[in-house]
Structure formats: C-alpha cells, structure tokens
Amino acid sequence: MKQLFNSLLLIGCLLGCVACEDDEKDGNFPALYTDMLCVSTAEDGTLKTVVLDNGEQYDVSAQGMTSDACSTTLRCRASYTLKDGRLKLHGIAHVFSDNPYPQEAFYVVVDGVAVHSPSLIPRDPVKLISMWKSGGYINLHLGVLTTGNGVHAYAFCRDGEGAYSLVHLRPQEDAESYTEHLYLSMPIPQGEEHPSFTVYTYDGIYTKTF
C-alpha cells in the first residue's frame, strides 16, 4: 500500500575527516569553529573551495581532502580553523540539502493509483534541537529516535506562499530507542524575505518565521 515518494532524498553520507595537527609551533592555537558551509569539488573529487555563510571564500585544494562527489557544490558541516587569511579543514561531513518540493509532488500509491493529499505527506516526529537561518539556508539540528533499522527519508515541502516544512518518513521496522543527531539544510528560494518553517516534533507542531 505504501510505495512512498520517489521525490524523497536520503541523508548524505560522511565525506571523511582528518586529524588535527599541531602546526602551531609557538603553542598558540587558533580557535576551532564548527559551522555549516558550502564546498566545491573538482573533477577528481578534490575539495577546491570553501564558502562560509558570511560570504568569505577560501581555497582548500592544497589540503588534499577528497569526496566521492565530483564537480559539484556540497552543503556541509565542518570543523575548521582560521589563521593569517587561511582556512584549514579538520573534519567535514555532507549535510542533506535539497530544494523544497510543492505538496503535489508527494504521493502514495493506493490500489495502483497515485493519491496526492497534504494529509498523506509523512510527518513522523523528531526532536527539534535548533533551527536557524544563515547563508541563504534554513538549517536544522534534529534528534531522531532510532534503533538503526532501515533508512529514514527526508525532504522539504513548500506548503504555501513563503511556508515550508520538514517531511520525514520513518521505516516501519525502526523502533524509537536512542537519539541520533542529524543536520539538514534547505536552500531558501529566491525572493523569500521572511520564510516560515514548520517541524512536527514530539511536543507538537513548531513553526518559526525568519
């Protein structure tokens, strides 16, 4: 009965990480930041450029970090240091990021017929740890209750003019046990000055307008 949502995309996979190095000979270490940012990759997957959400851009190609995603731009959560105008990556992970879909893009198949209805869009609850806007994105830090069975699916939905929400489908075989931390990031469509975003949580429906 449920053949759900060919438009749903899955969370990104871990790109990789590098260990911190003691490259400060005088014992003074630059501050370590952990933020959302965008990374461009070369044809061979080498990370080329990092763009912070404040617009600052840095060349990181000499650091030799690579990704399986080639010739593209990735939304990531990264740990890095800044010193003398240079950015050094210490750890980086791909964050699920996709444009929002209109409600009519979501459907379920009932008796061989595709049924479109806002009430059928999956809104399985999550823990909302934080939500913020930066760099043209709405960012989410979620806690997802899971036992690690099956794959959860996520998407962003456009519910109306300037209104967006999280779509979350929990696999039937996955029980609610321990909390897994998850980061998502939705690009804000051009022209949206004060978008709102809704998350279905265990404490009820939460909406924030930016």
Image (tube, grey):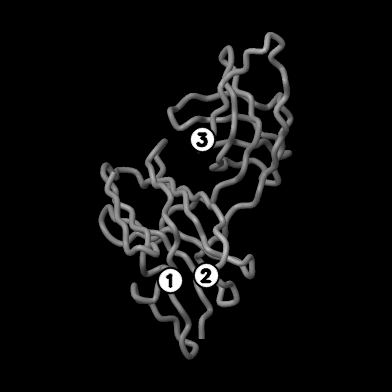
Q: CA distance from mark 3 to mark 1?
A: 29 Å
Estimate the x, y position of residue 188 in percent, counting from the top left. 38, 46
CB within 8 Å, label 1 to label 2: yes
Q: Is residue 160 left or right of residue 5?
A: left
Q: Which mark identifies residue 37?
A: none
Q: CA distance from mark 2 to mark 3?
A: 27 Å
CB within 8 Å, label 3 to label 1: no
Q: Is residue 158 above or below residue 58?
A: below
Mark whose residue sits in front, 3 or 1 = 3
**Sequence-first tag of 3 and 1:** 3
Which residue is drawn at the image coordinates 64% and 52% (left, top)?
A: 13
Q: Is residue 42 above or below residue 163?
A: above
**Sequence-first tag of 2 and 3:** 3
Mark 3 — residue? 35
**Sequence-first tag of 1 and 2:** 1
Residue extending farthest to the top is 26
Which residue is drawn at the image coordinates 26% and 44% (left, top)?
A: 194
Q: Secondary structure at mark 1?
A: loop
What kind of residue is marked 1? Pro
Mark 1 — residue? 122
Q: Secondary structure at mark 3?
A: strand
Q: Residues within 10 Å of mark 1 (few under 14, many from 20)?
A: many
Which residue is drawn at the image coordinates 56% and 41% (left, top)?
A: 76
Q: Secondary structure at mark 2?
A: loop
Estimate the x, y position of residue 12 in percent, counting from the top left. 60, 52
- Number of labels in the image equals 3
Q: Nearer the viewer, residue 81 or 9?
A: 81
Q: Which mark identifies residue 170?
A: 2
Estimate the x, y position of residue 154 in percent, counting from the top left. 50, 61
